[in-house]
Image (cartoon, rainbow, N blue to C red):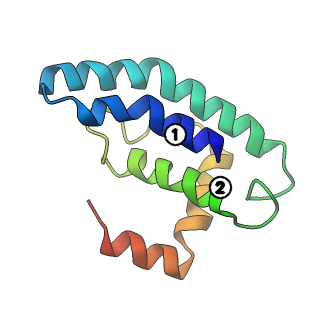
């Protein structure tokens, strides 16, 4: 869960930025530097497990990571390519598994961008 929190801490300043040009500059830097490194680290950790989830079954940590991926994949983060995580097959499988859970799918539908 710390990894999900670290991600939020690093991306949060771009949410708080009021100047749109500065915000897009921050997002471009995140997309070029921080997010690919974060995704790579998460992919390595997840690839070393025996299944779709980090701990063999869905946990809060999996849901937190999937929610970060949801933001990326669905354009919630302006300036971040929606394809940024596509090169991470284990993370994409985790995302698909989490968002296909009925209660998670219902939550995401209710709180769509």
| Total marks placed | 2
Q: Residue at x 58, y 60 (%)?
A: 63
- Say whether residue 10 is left or right of residue 111: right
Q: Position of residue 83 (x, y in %)?
A: 43, 40
Report the Cα–Cα distance between label 2 and label 1: 18 Å
Toward which corner of the image does residue 60 lie, by quadrant? Answer: bottom right
Q: Which residue is mark 2?
A: 61
Residue 40 falls left or right of residue 110: right
**Left or right, residue 90 beside residue 30:** right
**Crowd class of label 2 (few under 14; some 14 to 19; many from 20; radius 10 Å):** some
Q: Whole-percent x and y of residue 41?
A: 68, 31
Q: Secondary structure at mark 2?
A: helix
Q: Nearer the viewer, residue 30 or 15?
A: 15
- Mark linked to residue 37: none
Which of the pair 64/72 is nearer the observer?
Answer: 64
| Rendered residue at 68%/38% (across/down) | 43
On screen, residue 77 versus residue 32, left or right, reads left
When asked about the image quadrant of residue 95, the answer is bottom right
Q: Crowding near pointer 1: few (<14 within 10 Å), some, many (20+)?
A: some
Query: Whole-percent x and y of residue 1?
Result: 64, 48
Q: Quadrant of residue 58?
A: bottom right
Quadrant in which the C terminus is drawn = bottom left
Query: Residue shown at 45%/29% (left/top)?
Result: 10
| Vertical arrangement, residue 59 with respect to residue 15, above or below | below
| 87 or 112: nearer the viewer | 112
Q: Which residue is mark 1?
A: 85
Q: Tell me which residue sits at (73%, 58%) in the image.
A: 53
Secondary structure beneath disc 1?
loop
């Amino acid at each position: 869960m710390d990894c999900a929190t670290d991600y939020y801490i690093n991306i949060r300043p771009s949410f708080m930025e009021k100047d749109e040009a500065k915000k897009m500059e921050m997002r471009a830097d995140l997309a070029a530097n921080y997010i690919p490194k974060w995704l790579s680290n998460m992919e390595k950790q997840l690839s070393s497990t025996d299944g779709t989830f980090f701990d063999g079954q869905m946990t809060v940590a999996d849901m937190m990571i999937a929610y970060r991926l949801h933001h990326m994949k669905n354009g919630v983060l302006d300036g971040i390519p929606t394809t940024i995580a596509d090169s991470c097959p284990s993370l994409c499988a985790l995302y698909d598994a989490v968002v296909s859970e009925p209660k998670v799918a219902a939550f995401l539908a209710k709180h769509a961008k």
